[in-house]
């Protein structure tokens, strides 16, 4: 890698350092945890993450908790007959040998009752509870309201 | 649910009932994020791109606005005459000031529109858009709403719809066809 590319890589990865962390619990790895800046604290924040199950047993994400919000919950954006709705998701399946993404326009964590507005560059912890693997905590990077995801070297693979 | 599907296939509504009206035949009056009043006649002669949403939702709305911002960047100065508007289906929370805060995060050519409930209802009727308030636990509510992006030719004729999550390879050419 030449010096120019190295410098570019460092610049890109620095602000998204935490989102690019991978944490593991049992057969599950959790990575690319990010959120979007909010306008004030009176409206919900959002939580996106990628979960991979490398084991041979199905698991499921059944809840999230965070000091950043009083009432975090799991949602799924569904578009049916052209109409978008956002029903509550009781649990999000994480089948054996598969990856599941909480990502824009699909499953997401909805952070109701924010304690403070989320600003770009902030980070906060979210604890994920899995039906079988138990609890694991990840650090979540707050990106801009326009962001489509963190810039990680391994993102999208 | 089965009943609804069966009804739809047997009694397909006439096209005139499902396609948006030409802009010139619309009759809503809304206010933009700079507190200026906007009427359909103000858009005469311009290509138009409109979608409905509400800024309270952190998922669908910013995703659509983010997509639109990328399309506009792709189109560059060619899209400068294109009117791009988000019409709020949640005027109770989306005041012009909230919309101003919100759209400042995206391409500056995107405007936010809101207004009295009956004018939002009129706009939805003119565009053949559906929306519905859904009450949730804890006194919160969200809005179900039509998620597509509507395109119109400069003469006001409806051109096409870009579906939610439609690939940019298809979306940008659809917009380009309304620009000339
Ligand atoms: Cu949600």
Image (cartoon, coloured by chain):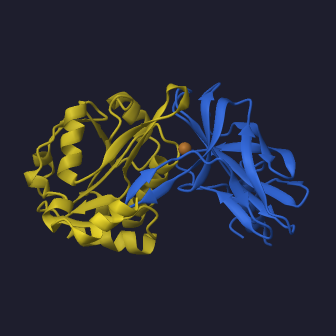
Q: From the viewer's perspective, is A23 left or right of B27?
A: right
**In front here: B21 or A90?**
A90
Q: Does residue A6 appear in this view? A: yes
Q: Where is residue B147 drawn, in percent x and y? A: 38, 55
Q: Does residue A12 appear in this view? A: no
Residue that protrudes farthest toward the right in the picture: A26
Q: From the viewer's perspective, is B58 left or right of B23?
A: right
Which quarter is ligand 1 in? top right
Above/below status of A81 relative to A123: below
**In front here: A142 or A79?**
A79
Residue B143's image quarter?
A: top left
Residue that protrudes farthest toward the front in the picture: B3
Residue B133's image quarter?
A: top left
Q: What tint does the image give chain A?
A: blue
Above/below status of B43 relative to B37: below
Q: Which chain shows up in yellow?
A: B
Q: Where is residue B22 drawn, in percent x and y? A: 13, 58
- Quadrant where the C terminus of chain B sits is bottom left
Image point 65% across, 47% down: which residue?
A: A90
**In front here: A135 or A144?**
A135
Image point 51% across, 32% down: which residue?
A: A39
Image point 52% across, 52% down: which residue?
A: A77
- Quadrant where the N terminus of chain B sits is bottom left
Q: Where is residue B36 drawn, in percent x and y? A: 22, 33
Above/below status of A5 relative to B34: below
Q: Where is residue B55 drawn, in percent x and y? A: 43, 39
Q: Give the total number of marks visible in the rendering.
A: 0
């Amino acid at each position: 890698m030449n010096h120019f590319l190295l410098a570019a890589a460092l610049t890109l990865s620095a602000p998204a350092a935490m989102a690019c962390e991978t944490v593991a619990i049992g057969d599950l790895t959790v990575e690319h945890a990010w959120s979007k800046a909010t306008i004030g604290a009176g409206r919900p924040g959002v939580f996106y993450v990628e979960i991979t199950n490398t084991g041979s047993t199905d698991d499921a994400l059944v809840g999230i908790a965070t000091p950043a919000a009083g009432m975090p919950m799991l949602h799924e954006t569904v578009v049916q007959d052209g109409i978008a709705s956002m029903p509550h998701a009781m649990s999000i399946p994480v089948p054996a040998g598969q990856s599941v993404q909480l990502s824009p326009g699909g499953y997401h964590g909805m952070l109701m009752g924010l304690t403070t507005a989320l600003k770009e560059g902030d980070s906060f912890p979210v604890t994920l509870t899995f039906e079988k693997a138990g609890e694991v905590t990840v650090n979540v990077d707050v990106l801009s309201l326009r962001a489509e995801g963190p810039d990680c070297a391994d993102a999208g693979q | 649910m089965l009943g609804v599907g069966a009804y739809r296939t047997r009694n397909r509504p006439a096209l005139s009932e499902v396609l948006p009206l030409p802009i010139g035949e619309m009759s809503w009056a809304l206010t933009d994020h700079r507190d200026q009043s906007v009427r359909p006649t103000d858009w005469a002669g311009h290509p138009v791109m409109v979608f409905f949403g509400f800024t309270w939702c952190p998922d669908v709305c910013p995703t659509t606005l983010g997509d639109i911002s990328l399309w506009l960047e792709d189109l560059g100065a060619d899209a400068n005459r294109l009117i791009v508007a988000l019409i709020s289906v949640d005027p109770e929370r989306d005041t012009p000031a909230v919309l101003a805060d919100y759209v400042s995060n995206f391409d500056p050519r995107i405007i936010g529109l809101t207004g009295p409930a009956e004018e939002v209802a009129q706009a939805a009727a003119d565009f053949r858009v559906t929306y519905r308030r859904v009450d949730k636990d804890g006194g919160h509510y969200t809005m179900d709403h039509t998620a597509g992006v509507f395109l119109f030719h400069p003469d006001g004729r409806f051109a096409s719809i870009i579906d939610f999550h439609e690939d940019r390879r298809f979306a940008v050419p659809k917009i380009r066809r309304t620009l000339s």
